Amino acid sequence: MNVPNPRQIDWREWHTLFRAIPDELVQNTRYYRHLPDVEWSLYLFPPSTHTVYGNRLLRKLRFDNSPAALRLWGFVLSECERLYRAKQAGMKVVAVMGDLGAVTPLIYSFPNTIAFYPDCLWWTPFLMESRVLFEEAAMLGLSEDCCYVRAALGGFARRAYFPRPDLCIATVGATCDDMAAVTAGVERLGCTVRYLELPHRADREKSLQQCYPPFNSPPQSGGEKDNSSQSGGEKDGSPRRGGEKNNRSQIGRDEKYHPRDELRSYIAGQHLKLCGWLEDLTGAKFNLNRYSATIHKVNHLRKTIADLKDLITTSGPNPMGALEMLNAEFAALSYYGDLDECCAVLDELHKTVEWRVKKRAGYPNQSVKLLWLTPPADPLLLNYVEELGGRIVATEYLINQTTPLISIENDKTAQLPSDEHHRSFGRESIFLPLSEAQLSGSLISSSDYRIGLALQYAGKSRANGAVISGVFGSSHCPYETAPLVEALRQAGIPTLAFDVVAPGKVRMQAQLLNRIEAFIEMLKNRKNANIDADADGDADERGRI
Amino acid sequence: MSDERMNARERWGLLLIDELTDRPPVYPLITSHAATVHGCNLIDYCRDGRVLAEAQIEAQRIYGQDGLTVFTDVGLIAEAFGSRYLLRAEDVPILLEPLIQNPEQVDDLAIPEPQSAGRLPVYIEAVDRLFTAAGDRQPVFAFIPAPFTTAAGLRGTETFLTDTILMPETAHKILDLTLNAALKLCDECILAGGLPVLVDPLASGSVISRHTFKEFALPYIKGLIDYLHRYDLDIMLHICGETKNILDLIPATDADLFSLDKLDLAAACKEIGSRVRLVGNIPPNSLLAFSGHPTFGPVEEALTIGMQNPKGFVLSTGCEVPIRADKEKLLTMINTAKRARYVEW
Amino acid sequence: MSSGNEIIAGVDVGSRSTKVVILRKMLQAGCQSSVVDSLQALPSHPEYEILARSLVPTGWTPQTAIAQAFQQALDQAGLQSVSRVIATGYGRSLVDFVDRRITEITAHARGAADLLPGMRTVIDIGGQDSKAIIISDGLVEDFAMNDRCAAGSGKFLEYLAMTMNLTVEEFAELAYRSNNPTNISSICTVFAESEVLSLLAEGVAREDVAAGAHKAIAWRVAQLALPLHPQTPVAFSGGVARNRCLVRELSQALKCEILVPPYPEFTGALGAALIGF
C-alpha cells in the first residue's frame, strides 16, 4: 500500500494533491453501486469542491493526507446530495430523529431503503460558518436557548439540505428535550412524525442493570423501592453532585425499577412497531435473512470503528486526525446513507491506520493526550487542539447505542416471522439483540454510566487531560457536565469544560480558543515538569493516570 | 421578495442536483453595472478587489438577484500575460496593444501567476471577500475568460483569427498557453470560494465560423471543463451574440449550464435542453432607460419557455447588464421573474 | 534555555491596557541594581533585574499601543533592542516582533509565583474576563475562566461607574468608604445597571450601592474559583487588584486573606518575560 507520511494538510494542499489521484480511482469510487454507472454517484473529491458550494469552514480545517481520509471526507460531505439522489432513484428515505442510531440496522434491512439523521445538521451551520439554519429555527420558535440540533428544524423548513423523508421517526421518553422541541416543530411544518417510546433515564447505580420504563404500570417482577442511598445521593436523599438533581427530576417520582429483560422486551416491541411502519412504507415484508445480512454489515462497521478507536488509543504517534475519527464514529448512526459503501470507506481508513500504527508513523508534535467527551459541534475545535500539540486519544460522543455488536447469530429466540402472525405480540423477540444494544444508549443510561466510561477511557489511554464540550441549551449538557468534571478531577485528570460557541460570535469564540490554549499549555508544562522530574530520578506522578 | 424562504445558494444547489426549487434562479449578469449602483468608477472597480466586492454586495442588496459575480473584462488574463489594456472610468477596459506581435514570442511566454500577475490578484481578492461575506447564502461566480477569447487578447482579434487560418499551429500553441493560464486562475478562484464560469465572447457565431469554433474554441473549452469536472464542479459556459450555428456543439463542451444570448430560447430548449441547463436570455439593451423595449413581457415569455426545460432553467440576461442600465427596469425584470413558481415552497 | 546577561521583554496586551516589562537576566546572583528608580518598589530578585516597565491604554488600535508601550520601555531602559520578546494577553497574536506567545493564565501564574513566592491561588480580573488559577509547585494545576459576557470582569465595574458618572478609581474609593454594601442581584451587566439606578432612586447611599457592585463581582469571581478548591495564600493580580474595595470583598467572599503583589498590573508582563528565561 502506498501511503504517504502522515501529515495534516489544508484544503489548498489537498486541491493540488488531488491531481495526482488516478482517474480510475476517482471513477471507481461511487456510492449506490447497485445503480449502473450514474455520473452523480462519484464522491472522491477534495474539500475545495465542497468549499465552493458553501462549506466555508473547510478553508480553516486541516485534513489527514491519506487517500483513505480523502475518501472518508468525500463520502461524508456528499451525504446531502446522496439523499436527494436516493429519492430520485426511487429509494425510500427515512429520517430518524433523537437518540436513534440504534434502529438504523432495521431500516436498512428493507429493500431500497436508507436512513439519515437530521439531527446531525447541527454541524452544518459550523461547516458553513452560517446562521441561516439557526435563523430559520428561530423564526419557528427555537432560538438560542435550544441546543444546536435546532438546525434540523431549519433544514426541514428550508427543504434544501435533505429531501422530504418518506417516513420520519422520532422518540419519546429518554430523548433529548431539545430534540423533542425540534420534532414538535417538524410536525407543525406539516410533516408526519411517528414516535417510538424509549425507557426513561436510568438511575445512577442501577444503570447497568435496570432502567425506568416510560409507563406508569407497576413492575411485573424484580421491582424494588429506592428510598435512600441507592440513588447514589447523600443519605438524606439530597443531590450529591451538580447533575444529580436534574437527573432525578427527569426520571420522575416513580421509584420502581424494571428489570433489564423487561425493558429489552419493551424496546423490542417498539422495534416491531417500526417494522410495521417500514413494511407499510416499502410494501415489502420483513425478511429475516435480509435483516441478518444487514446486522452482519452493521456489526462489521461497528467493529471497524471500535478497532479504529482502539488503535488511536494505544498507538505511538497519532495515526489519524480527530476530525476523521469523528466522521468515522458518526458513521455508525446512519451510515451516511449507504451502508455498503460506508463499510468500504471505513475499511480503507482502518487499513491506513493499521499500517501507520505498525510502522509507528503518525503526526509529529502531538504529545498531550486528551480524552474528549460530548461531540464538539464545531469541527474547528478538534483541529485547534491538535495544532496546539494536543492529541485526542479517546472519545465519548454520546452515541453509545451505536457501539455494541448485535448478537443476532447467537440469539436462540430469533425466529423467522410468518405472515399470519405478522403483527402478533411475541415476535419482537427477533429484535431483542437490537434492543439490548439500544439500552447502552447515552440518553437511556445514567450519568454514572458515562462517568464510568470516561474514567475507563482516560485510564486506558493514559490521557493527560479531559475536555468536555457542552452545548448551551442542550438539555443533557448541564446535568452531566458537572458530575463528569468532578469525577475526572477527583481521579486526578485535569478537565476543561466549556460550551461551544455558535458560528459568527467572534469575540466569544476567541475567548474559548484562549481557554483551550491555556489548558493545553498547562498540560504541556505539567508533562514537561514530570519528564524533568523523571530525568532527575524523582518521578512526579501528579496528573498521571 | 425578502419573504422568500429559500436563499440563492440553496436554490442553485438544488438546481445543480436536478431537484425542484421554488422558482428558477434569477441571475442577470450584473458585472460592471455594480460599479454604477455603488457609485464608484470603473478604474477602481477593475483595480481594487475590495471595491469590486463592495459594489457586488451593494448591487445584490438593491436587486436581490441570485448570485454574486466577479467579472471586469475579457482581457483579464491577456493583460496578466502582458498585453496592454486601457482602463477607463466610464467604460470597460479596451485592448491597446496585444503582447504577441511576432509568433516567435510564443515560445518564451510564461503562464501568469494568479497571485501576482496583472489584475489577477484583484480578482481573487474580490472572490475571497465575497465568499467570506456571503458565501453561505450566495454562490460566488468567478467569470474566467475562456482560452479562445484570451488568445485574441494576446494576439489581437483580427490577427488571431487570421492565425487560425494561416498559422493554425501557432494558434494552437497560443491556445495551449491560454488554457493553462485559465486553469491556474480557475484553481485560485476555487480556493478563494468562487465557482468558475467560462466566458467566451470571441467564440460567438457573430465572430467566428462553426468550423473555427469546432477547431479552435471547443477543444479548449472542453479541456477547461474536463479539468473542472474532475473536481466535480458544475460549469456554466457563456457565449455572447449568435450561437445558432454552434448550438448542437454545446453539449460536446460538457458544460453543465449554457448561458445564451441572441438565440431563440424555445429552439435551444428543444435542441439541447434535455442535456444542458439553460441560462438566459433577456436582451440587455431592453434594460436601458430609453430603449423603448418592454421588460415585463419578455420575462414572462422566457419563463414560460425556460421553466419547461427538462434540465432546468435560470432566468438571466443574454449578456452583461449594461453599465448604465435603468435600475427600475432591472428591478422590474428581477421581481417579475421572482414571482414565477415551480411549486409553492 | 539561554545564556546569561540576556535582556528579555514581556508584552501583555490586555483588552484595556498594554504592559511591557524588560528584564535583564543576572550573570551572578545578587548583583542587581535597578536602572529605573521608580521600580524600586518591586522586590529585588537574585536572578534578574527589572530595567523598565511601561503601560499604554490599548484603545482601538492595539498595534499602535503595542509599539508605543514597547518603545517607551526601550527608552526607559536605554536600549535599542532586546534579546527575546514573549507576548501574552488577548492581543498577543498582534505582537509581530515576538519569539513566543503564551496565554495569560501561564503568564499570571508565573508572575505571581515570582512576586509572591508560595502562592497557591491567583485571581486575575481583567477587562474582558476573570480567571482563577491554582498553582502547585510553580505550575498551573487548574484554572477557571468566566466567559460569555462582561459580568465578572473589569468591564462590569466600568459600566456601573459610568452609570454613577464616576471614574473607575472614584467608584472604587467611594465603595471602600461603605460599611454596608447593598445586594445587587443581577448578574447581567445590563440588568445590574438598571438595578443600580433603581437603588439610587430608592435612596440607598451611593457608597453602599458602589460597594454592592464590588461585592457582586467578588462573589461571582469566588463562584468561579471555589469549584477548584482554592488553597491559600491567594494572590490578586492585574490592574483591578489596585481596587481596595474589591480586595476587601474578595477576601470576604473567599474567606481568606488576599495578597496583592506590588504593581499588580505588570504581573502578566513580568510572568511572560520570566518564561523567556
Image: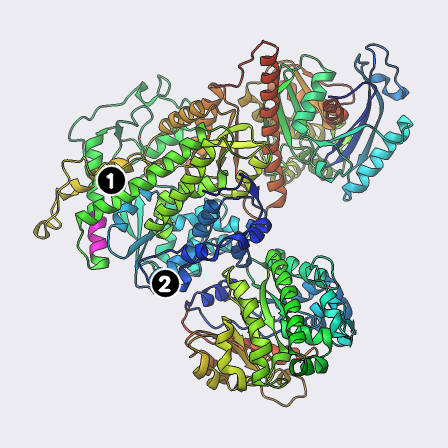
Count numbered badges in the picture.
2
- Which amino acid is tagged 1? Leu
Q: Quadrant of residue B65?
A: bottom right
Q: Secondary structure at mark 1?
A: helix
Picture layout, residue A269 above or below residue A368: below
| Residue C250 at x, y percent in the picture | 65, 22
Picture layout, residue B43 above or below residue A264: below
Q: Is residue A352 visible?
A: yes
The answer to whether the residue labelled 2 contacts the one labelled 1, judged by CB atoms less than 8 Å apart, is no
| Residue A534 at x, y percent in the picture | 58, 13
| Residue A238 at x, y percent in the picture | 38, 22
Which residue position holds label 1? A434
Main secondary structure of the magenta stretch? helix
N-term-proximal mark, 2 vs 1: 2
Asked if residue B143 lies in the magenta stretch, the reply is: no
Disc marking residue C228: none
| Residue C181 at x, y percent in the picture | 65, 25
Give the camera-side residue of C213 and C67.
Answer: C67
Asked if residue A278 lies in the magenta stretch, the reply is: yes
Q: Chain of mark 1?
A: A
Q: Which residues are magenta?
A: A273-279
The quarter of the rendered structure image containing the C terminus of chain B is bottom left
- Which amino acid is tagged 2? Asp
Which residue position holds label 2? A37
Q: Residue at x 60, y 40 (%)?
A: C191
Q: Secondary structure at mark 2?
A: loop
Q: Residue at x 73, y 40 (%)?
A: C94
